[in-house]
Image (tube, rainbow, N blue to C red):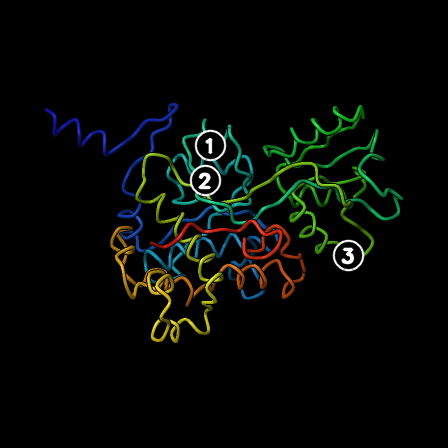
């Protein structure tokens, strides 16, 4: 009886009415593909490029996990999801990981049966307005109509900000970011509020991007990161350390171009452990010894991903800011040690 109960407890763990099935690693290996939930289309984070392939910072997180688990970063099935759909898709098992510009909050961490595996991008909520409006600061937005995406943290943040400052506003909600953007362009509202990174991304889609600006005020903390189901610690560790591998690789100067040479010649003990030359981190994670090598070789380190997707090598040209490594002044990106 004791063994039977043990098998049942390992097979499924019920949290807040949500059943999280253990064995995601085995399921992904059996399917030979990773199912990843992403935004329906957000430049810099997850969008389909002109080559018909998905690209973006969130997309690279999925590819890194596929590289670590399957040895091939291309073995990903991307599932586009709206803000309303994203959590249910993960809870139900439709996807294996959610990497969709999602804010890590206390309520989400404790009530959804899901775990955040780290921070991909430190963000904050801002406001996008037309320069013709003549607004310089958020304090001048009293009485404004605001386009906003439903089912996001931005709704509560917006209410808190306006109430705290004794201002009124008229919210106009939409289900997708594309609808928000079109509503704004059509004149349905005076401004858009969302994560600042998303505002920069939306601006690139406008016919005349230079006619619009993001106000300097940031009204919230928005740490964005990937999620997995609770109850499967093996999978949680894999996703968490796949992201950490990208950050540590940048810290130690390991790039997609030099990773082969670093693997052969580096005498740094941390580099050796990251690349699987020494230690048994891969074994402990139930992966091959070269799991992190595959991530860096096929996807790149965190800095490479950041620059090509949202940084200076991208149309968004967002500065690293808080997303610099901890070794750079003001940077928050930090991986625990590989040891």
Rounded to the nearest angstrom, the CA distance separating label 3 from label 2 is: 36 Å
* Number of numbered tags placed on the structure image: 3
Mark-to-mark CA distance, 1 and 3: 39 Å
The picture quadrant where one finds residue 183 is: top right
Q: In the rendered image, which residue does mark 2 sit on?
A: 116
Identify residue for label 1.
109
**Alpha-carbon neighbours of circle 1 within 10 Å: few (<14), some, or many (≥20)?**
some
Q: Is residue 339 above or below residue 97?
A: below
Tell me where residue 60 appears, x and y as whole percent: 48, 57
- Residue 128 located left or right of residue 77: right
Query: Circle 3: is it few (<14), some (14-19), or many (20+) Cα within 10 Å?
Result: few
Judge by depth and name the residue closer to the eye, 174 or 269.
269
- Quadrant of the image containing the N terminus: top left
- Lower sequence index among marks 1 and 3: 1
Q: Residue at x 69, y 41 (%)?
A: 180
Which numbered mark, 1 or 3, is in the foreground of this view? 1
| Image x and y of residue 133, in percent | 88, 43
x, y percent for residue 105 = 53, 33
Comparing 175 with 296, the one in front is 296
Q: Which of the two residues, 300 or 276, is positioned nearer the viewer here? A: 276
In the rendered image, which residue does mark 3 sit on?
Answer: 207
Q: Residues within 10 Å of mark 2 (few under 14, many from 20)?
A: many
- At a point 80% along the width and 57% down the height, the residue shown is 210
Q: Residue at x 46, y 64 (%)?
A: 252
């Amino acid at each position: 009886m004791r063994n039977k109960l043990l098998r049942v407890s390992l097979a499924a763990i019920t949290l807040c009415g949500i059943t999280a099935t253990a064995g995601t690693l085995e399921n992904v290996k059996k399917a030979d593909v990773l199912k990843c939930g992403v935004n329906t289309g957000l430049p810099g984070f997850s969008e389909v490029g002109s080559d018909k392939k998905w690209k973006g910072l969130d997309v690279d997180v999925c590819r890194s996990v596929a590289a670590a688990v399957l040895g091939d970063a291309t073995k990903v099935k991307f599932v586009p999801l709206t803000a309303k759909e994203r959590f249910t898709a993960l809870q139900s098992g439709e996807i294996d990981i959610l990497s969709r510009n999602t804010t890590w909050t206390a309520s989400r961490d404790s009530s959804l049966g899901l775990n955040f595996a780290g921070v991909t991008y430190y963000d904050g909520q801002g406001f996008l307005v037309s320069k013709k409006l003549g607004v310089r600061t958020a304090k001048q937005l009293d009485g404004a109509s605001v386009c906003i995406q439903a089912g996001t943290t931005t709704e509560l943040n917006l209410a808190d900000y306006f109430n705290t400052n004794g201002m009124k506003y008229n919210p106009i909600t939409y289900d997708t970011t594309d609808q928000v953007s079109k509503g704004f362009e059509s004149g349905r509202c005076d401004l858009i509020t969302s994560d600042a990174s998303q505002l920069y991304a939306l601006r690139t889609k406008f016919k005349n991007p230079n006619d619009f600006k993001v106000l300097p005020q940031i009204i919230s903390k928005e740490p964005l990161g990937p999620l997995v189901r609770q109850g499967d610690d093996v999978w949680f560790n894999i996703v968490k350390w796949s992201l950490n591998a990208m950050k540590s690789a940048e810290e130690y100067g390991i790039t997609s171009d030099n990773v082969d040479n670093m693997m052969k010649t580096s005498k740094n003990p941390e580099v050796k452990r990251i690349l699987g030359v020494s230690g048994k981190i891969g074994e402990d994670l139930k992966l091959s010894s070269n799991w992190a090598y595959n991530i860096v070789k096929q996807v790149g380190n965190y800095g490479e991903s950041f620059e090509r997707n949202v940084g200076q090598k991208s149309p968004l040209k967002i500065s690293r800011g808080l997303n610099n490594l901890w070794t750079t002044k003001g940077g928050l990106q930090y991986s625990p040690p590989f040891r």
